[in-house]
Image (spheres, rainbow, N blue to C red):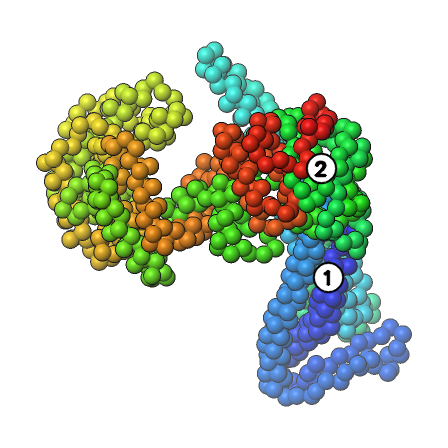
Amino acid sequence: MDRDPIAFTWRTARREHVAAVGLALGLGGPLALLALLCLRDLVGMQVHDGAATGQFLRVAATLPWRPAAEGPFVAFPGWTLPAAELVRAAFLGLAATALASAGLGWAVARLCFRAQARTVAALQGRVTEAILRAPPSARDEARALAQTLGDLLARLDTLFGLAILVPALALGSAGLALVLAGMAAPRLLPTVAAGLLAAGLARILIQRRVQDRAVLRLRAGGTAGRALADLIRRMPAVRAHGAAAFERGRLAAKGAATRDALAASDSRLALARAPSMALAILLPAIVVAVALWRGHDGTTEPVEPGAVLAAGGAFALAVVALSVALRLVGLHGALAGPFREVALGVPALETRAPVRSGGAAFPESGALVARGVGAYDPATGERLAGVDVALPMPGHVAILGERGSGSRVLAAILAGQLEPSAGAVTYAGLDLRAFEPEERARRIALAGAEAILIEGTLRQNILYGAGHVPDRDELIATLRITGLDAFAYARGLEGTVDPNAEPEIARAVVAARHAVREALAADKAGRLVEPFDPARYNHQATVGENILFGEAVGPAFAAEHVAAHPYLRAVLEAEGLSRPLTEIGLQVARSLVEIFADLPDDHPLFETFSLFPASERGFFEDLVGRQPEATGLRRGPAGQRDRKRLIGLALRYSETRHRFGLIDAAFEGRLVEARRSFARLMPPHLRGGVEFYDPDRLTAAASLEENVLFGRINGEEAGAEARVRALVRRVLADEGLEPAVYRLGLESRVEPGLAGGGASLGENAIGPRERVAIDLARCLVRRPDIVVVAIALEDRKSAAMRDRLAALRAARAGRGLIVCLPDDGILQAAEPFDAVLRVERNGVLAA
């Protein structure tokens, strides 16, 4: 791999760079020359306004070695045109070259962007391939290489796209400036050449000073940030000992040194700009003086103003191109180091990949043999030494050993996912390292840890890496084997159904709603679910939910915003509920502050039962402390804020759940009246914000479970939730909706969260137990020849583990299975394994 970024982009996107340079110089150069010649002729004709005719686009130059009698060398005679037509032709030529230059610039820019995209893709692809093929022991090197590449791409700018084109344009522009200077007068050539050289040197000096100043400012900013962070750390001591004056002096002394260094850098930069400013004044004056010079004898003809203007325009273009080229040179210098690190890191990582024996077919069956194997797993800290085992495949093998014994290392070695530091593992006589990782993982699957989740649905996470898509029945069977069926089913009940996209499912859900009601009545369990009745207050719902009597669609009437909505506030005011709800909110706040006074913010009881989040705890404590009665709330914006927060607290209150005795039957009736007013008076533009409950129609914004129940489970009945959900599951199965529930569960979004034992706290987060099950499901749906399970199937009861193990062995009948188990107690009453290994003290014994 090339170690220079310019060489790498040239080798990667040579066609694009050649095409861009060819267009820019081959077409852009003539267009620029044409535009400057048109400008020359236009100005020349305006200066000599008395001339009847003029030469349009004549290209001629006085050659020093050509005899004066022969006149200038004429490369193109041009056309003789009347003055008016020449002016018109010059204007049209300028307009045409402007349009053509715009189109050419677009085409060249597209080529440059394509070259940069291709180069970046090639660089990322090379790094990605090196990381994918790196062994597990090279994880730190891969992480460092990825970090370096990320830093490089963040600072890349346009180096890959313009690094070849811009220097070529600078050379072409300089050549054009010299050509036009020579056409104007030979004596202008050294002046223009010296001017380009001086402008380049001045720009280099400024660029170096700017870079030094940027580095110094970055360093100064870091120093200031660390000093202030240290001051914040010291603040308790500063307040305790009154050391503010000392800290001011200390920070001022540190700041003085930084300011002096920055002042010196600014001074050097200003000094570097001086030559550039001087050249900006001197160069035009020198060019004009040379152009008007008549010679020692006064017989030399002055240069035509149009020719001087054309040469000056070419000179300006060359200076601009030279400045851009020098800026790219500076960018190249800044990125050459990181690119070199990547260029050295990729081959180093590639050499860590084991050598593959191309063409070796993966055997269908054979003995899985480890001879003299030793290995260390940096992820778990487990190690093994002197392992000698031979396992016939397909067969079922149990590895007994507690966590930390080395059983997981043995499983990873047998699956080919951990390379042994000594010895070798073979399958049917072929070294596992000889096969491509993708093929080996396809044939030998390892469920070795909690699954690393991806952004997407539960189905996408289970099918991650699968070569085929299993049918519905096969996928559900896999869910049951791994224990994910209950999780997916619960997720499905939380999902929503779009009646427009799935009208048959929507009708079936409404039918199931009536079937559930009949089943509850038949079991004399109607009291376990309180239905949504437009004429009755639902005691299982909050005050706010009772007023809305529907599901919020969008953020307008969402639970966190509903208290501040002007329409709801107007309804509450019209129904005379604003003050009662404010009083309820204040009593709720007072009760909660008292109940949770001794509990920390992160206590589970506070998180579960508090009606306000921990971030608002201080506000309500202060409000309760300064406001004994709701009638004495402050006036003005502060009082309105307090009322809004208290009403929001009241809207989240449920008498059944919180039991503060704040709502009686009469007040429930007033809330039901407010419900009717809320629905009846709602303006048309707000109707889309709430989907009201309808007993004969599916509520698209509500969950599947709420649609089936069309109510809430009675929280006052012990065991009601389990009993109702069992009945619902039975009804859904009878109605043929169970596959739809699983489908909704599999289509639910998951939140990747953290790997390695961490947990995300998001709404769609998945816990460690489910992650383990997902990793096992990923292995099973791929239908590999051998499945190696390096994690406990169930870490609760032995009986449940036996059932899960039996289901797994039944699913893998006739195919290879290696499973790690904590002890031999699980093997009792189980069908005998083909082989049992016991791992103790970093060694393997036959059981």
Residues 33 and 574: in front is 574
Judged from the image, the secondary structure of the residue bearing numbered disc 2 is helix
Judged from the image, the secondary structure of the residue bearing numbered disc 1 is loop
Q: Which residue is mark 1?
A: 13
Q: Which residue is mark 2?
A: 413
Q: Is residue 540 above or below residue 74?
A: above
Q: Position of residue 438 (x, y in %)?
A: 69, 50
Q: Can residue 371 be seen by looking at this rendering?
A: yes
Instruction: Say few, some or many: other residues with alpha carbon within 10 Å of mark 1 (under 14 / 14 to 19 / 20 or more).
Output: many
Residue at 41 percent of width and 45 percent of height: 489
Q: How many discs mark residues in the rendered view?
A: 2
Residue at 59 percent of width and 74 percent of height: 99
Q: Can residue 46 be seen by looking at this rendering?
A: no
Residue at 27 percent of width and 31 percent of height: 718
For the C terminus, the image quarter is top right
Residues 514 and 815: in front is 815
Question: Residue farthest to the top?
Answer: 241
Residue at 59 percent of width and 31 percent of height: 827
The amino acid marked with disc number 1 is Ala
Residues 765 and 231: in front is 765
Q: Nearer the viewer, mark 1 or mark 2?
A: 2
Distance (Cα) linking label 1 and label 2? 42 Å
Q: Position of residue 296 (x, y in %)?
A: 83, 67
Give the mark nearest the N terminus, 1 or 2: 1
